[in-house]
C-alpha cells in the first residue's frame, strides 16, 4: 500500500539534509520516512501485535 507524499514535505526533508549529503543519504531518509508512515498507518488501523507475542516468537525473555 503506497502512502501519498506531500510535495512540501519532500522539500522539507531535502532541506533538512546537510549540504554535503549524498543520493544515498536522501534515499535513506525517504526509506525511513516511508517505514514510519506505514507503521503509523498500521497502528491506526489496529494492525499491531503485543510485544510479548513477538518476544515469544523469537525466543526472547519477557
Image (cartoon, rainbow, N blue to C red):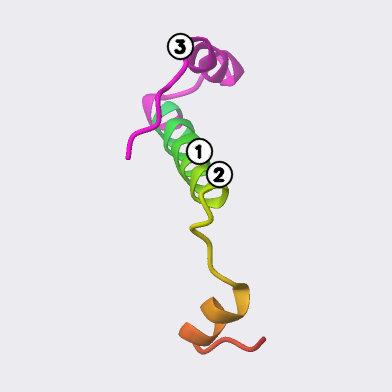
Name the residue furthest front.
45
Q: Are marks 1 and 2 in contact (CB under 8 Å)?
A: yes
Q: Is residue 27 above or below residue 41?
A: above
Q: Name the residue located 44 percent from the left edge and 37 percent from the top edge.
A: 34
Question: Closer to the camera, 34 or 53?
Answer: 53
Query: In this figure, which residue is indicated by the disc labeled 3?
Result: 7
Image coordinates for residue 42, horizontal then vertical, percent:
49, 50
Query: In this figure, which residue is indicated by the disc labeled 2?
Result: 40
Name the residue furthest right.
62
In the image, is residue 14 part of the stretch drawn in magenta?
yes
Q: Are marks 1 and 3 in contact (CB under 8 Å)?
A: no
Query: In this figure, which residue is indicated by the disc labeled 1?
Result: 37
Q: Is residue 25 above or below residue 1?
A: above
Q: Are marks 3 and 2 in contact (CB under 8 Å)?
A: no
Residue at mark 3 to residue at mark 2: CA–CA distance: 19 Å
Q: Which residues are magenta?
A: 1-25
Q: Name the residue located 56 percent from the left edge and 46 percent from the top edge.
A: 44
Question: Residue 13, located in which quarter of the rendered image?
Answer: top right
Question: Closer to the camera, 20 or 35?
Answer: 35
Q: Is residue 46 above or below residue 37?
A: below
Amino acid at each position: 500500500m503506497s502512502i501519498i507524499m506531500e510535495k512540501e514535505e519532500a522539500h522539507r526533508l531535502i532541506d533538512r539534509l546537510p549540504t554535503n549529503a549524498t543520493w544515498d543519504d536522501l534515499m535513506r531518509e525517504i526509506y525511513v520516512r516511508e517505514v514510519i508512515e506505514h507503521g503509523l498507518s498500521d497502528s491506526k488501523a489496529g494492525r499491531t501485535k503485543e510485544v510479548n507475542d513477538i518476544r515469544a516468537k523469537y525466543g526472547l525473555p519477557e
